[in-house]
Amino acid sequence: MDTIISLFALLIGLLIRLAIPIVLTALLIVLLHKLDARWQAEAQLPLPASQNIECWKVKGCRPEQRRNCVAAKSNLPCWQTYRLPNGYLREECLACNVFTEAPLPALTTEPRRI
């Protein structure tokens, strides 16, 4: 009888010590995978038309300047195309009317799912 109780206690100990953390880790992996898939789907969505500001119209650039401009050929806002290698914005972009008057991205909320 003592051996059965000892064996049962050992199995319960292994369950608590190993199985529960493994199950919780697997559950966390599944949740993070779903979150990553959602973020990737959001990244594939096109930008709203209000966020594609044509800065050369605001600044009054000449056609030859526009042909050589990287921002005119990109779908991103001009301050995104001229970011520095470390990710910072250029000083001239921070003071530019195109950047300061750009509409803020709309925040969308979804109902919580449990």
Image (cartoon, rainbow, N blue to C red):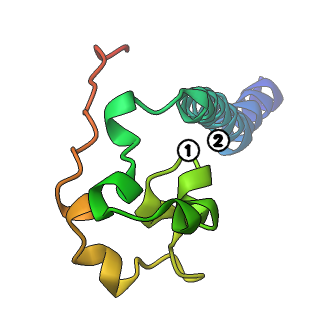
Q: Which residue is mark 1?
A: 75
Is residue 87 shown left or right of residue 1?
left
Q: Does dot 2 land on a helix, a strand or a loop?
A: helix
| Quadrant for the C terminus in the image | top left
Please name whichever residue, 74 or 85, is drawn nearer the observer in this view of the structure.
74
Q: Quadrant of residue 56?
A: bottom left
Is residue 7 shown left or right of residue 89?
right
In this rendering, is residue 90 above or below 53?
below
Q: Quadrant of residue 61?
A: bottom left
Amino acid carrying label 1: it is: Asn
Amino acid carrying label 2: it is: Pro
Q: Quadrant of residue 33?
A: top right
Is residue 57 shown left or right of residue 36?
left
Q: Are marks 1 and 2 in contact (CB under 8 Å)?
A: no
Q: Residue furthest front?
A: 63
- Percent across and percent down for residue 7 are 80, 31
The answer to which of marks 1 and 2 sits earlier in the sequence is 2
Q: Which residue is mark 2?
A: 21
- Percent across and percent down for residue 87 are 51, 76
In this rendering, is residue 45 above or below 32?
above
| Quadrant for the N terminus in the image | top right
